Image (cartoon, rainbow, N blue to C red):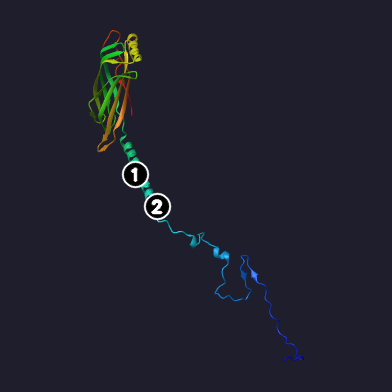
Amino acid sequence: MNDPNRPPVTGYPAPTQPPPHQNPNGYTQPPPGTAYPYAAPPPSSAAYYHNNNNNPPYYQQQPPHPYAAFATQRATFLRRVIAIAIASMVITGTFVFIVWLILRPKLPEFRVDSLSVSNLNLNNSLISANWDLRFTVKNPNKKMTLYYDEVALGVFYDYVSLSDTTVAPFYQEKRAETGEKASFATSGSYVDNRVFDGMSKEREKRGVIGFNVRMFARIRFKAGAWRARRRFVRVYCKGLDVGVGSGKSSGNLIGGSRQCRVGL
């Protein structure tokens, strides 16, 4: 029973519970001092998604493609092949340049010594004639020999071919000179009216006809065991005036020998 005369018991008032706290992510935090049923409080969402390595989470990473390793090996192989090819070209070019500096190959020199015409007949745009050519070839190289595998020649008036021929292959030692001769013939060949008129006028007015000789030679350069690839040499001998005046059918080169222009 309760004694009405009993004084009230005094003591500490009942503790009041503070309102729950909420973080910005919506997670309600218990008041201070509240124990968790786990070893550590649950992580916040910001800490859960934070990644210091800037890599996607493990569940977003895809397995490597089965051909990725093969593609990498192929790219590496191609890079090596290209590097080897470039290095080979550089080495070869350097070697050729050094050989060229040592040997200093020079083109041969050509000179027309004489040109004669016989049995010349110009009639109604038709020409008949025989030409005899003598020329000299000089090898100016001090360390290289030359092989003339093929030499083709043609006699021209202006830029029109009148006749052509070839000479036998020959060989030249260092600093050597070789004399060669060639014969041309044409019988009743048609020529353009402009060419026919030009030769007729020169013959009547000047008493000469100016012919041109062209040569095409395939040459090999050799120095000991070293051989260069074949070179195709073009030779131009212009302004070869032959004295065949009006009424004459034969004549010879006027003005002595002529040096020819040589090019590749």
Q: Amino acid at mark 2?
A: Ala
* Identity, as a three-letter code, of the amino acid under mark 1: Ser
Q: Please state the horizontal and vertical placement of residue 210, each as a whole percent of the image.
A: 32, 15
145 shown above or below 77: above
* Front one among 76 and 8: 8
* Rendered-image quadrant of the N terminus: bottom right
Front residue of this view, candidates 54 and 9: 9
- Nearer the observer, disc 1 or disc 2? 2
In the displayed structure, does residue 254 sit left or right of residue 35? left
User: Would you say the residues marked 1 and 2 are in contact, meaning their CB atoms lie under 8 Å apart?
Assistant: no
Residue 88 got which mark? 1
Percent coordinates x, y for residue 227 in the rendering:
27, 36
Determine the image quadrant of residue 174.
top left
Crowd band around label 1 with a 10 angstrom C-alpha radius: few (<14), some (14–19), many (20+): few
Q: Which residue does the image show at 36% across and 14% down from the upper left?
A: 194
**Quadrant of the rendered structure where residue 262 is?**
top left
Considering the numbered disc 1 on the image, is that residue within a helix, a strand or a loop? helix
Where 137 falls versus 30 (above or below)?
Answer: above
Count every numbered label the image shows and give the total: 2
Tell me the residue at 65%/70% (across/down): 21
Q: Residue 9, image x and y in percent?
A: 73, 87
Depth check, front residue: 65 or 249: 65
Q: Which residue is mark 2?
A: 71
Q: Secondary structure at mark 2?
A: helix
Horizontal and vertical percent position of residue 64? 43, 57
Residue placed furthest toward the top:
247
